[in-house]
Amino acid sequence: MATSNSSKAPELSYEQARDELAKVVASLEGGQTTLEQSLALWERGEELAKICQQWLDGAKEKLAKAKPATEK
């Protein structure tokens, strides 16, 4: 699903990205990772958050387009 902010579609569905992001957060909150692992998890979390935001922005655009002109 491409948005105006990105010319390529996210490689994961919203649900896949959200679920993986939840696992990343749980790992970081668990505190059982090394600094290097934590940094890698953080970076992956940032990527996943961007993917989720792309999906949400795309859905918002579709909803805005679907509304009658009087409701905009």
Image (cartoon, rainbow, N blue to C red):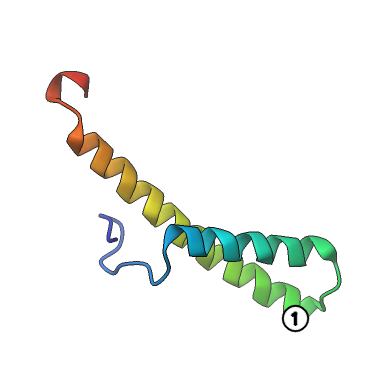
Q: Nearer the viewer, residue 72 or 63?
A: 63
User: Which quarter of the picture shows residue 4?
Assistant: bottom left
Q: Which quadrant, please, contains the C terminus? A: top left
Name the residue type under label 1: Glu
Q: Residue furthest right?
A: 32
Q: Nearer the viewer, residue 5 or 52?
A: 52
Q: Is residue 35 left or right of residue 40?
A: right
Q: Position of residue 63 (x, y in %)?
A: 27, 37
Residue drawn at point x = 27 percent, y = 61 percent: 2
Q: Position of residue 60 (x, y in %)?
A: 32, 41
Residue drawn at point x = 28 percent, y = 69 percent: 8
Count of number-bearing discs:
1
- Label 1 CA crowd tier, 10 Å (few <14, some 14–19, many 20+): few
Q: Which quadrant, please, contains the N terminus? A: bottom left
Q: Position of residue 64 (x, y in %)?
A: 24, 35
Residue drawn at point x = 44 percent, y = 58 percent: 14
Q: Is residue 72 left or right of residue 45?
A: left
Instruction: Give the residue at mark 1.
Output: 36
Q: Is residue 1 above or below residue 65?
A: below
User: Which quarter of the picture shows residue 29?
Assistant: bottom right
Q: Residue furthest top?
A: 70
Q: Is residue 33 above or below residue 28?
A: below
Q: Is residue 66 left or right of residue 48?
A: left
Q: What secondary structure is marked by label 1?
A: helix
Q: Position of residue 55 (x, y in %)?
A: 38, 54
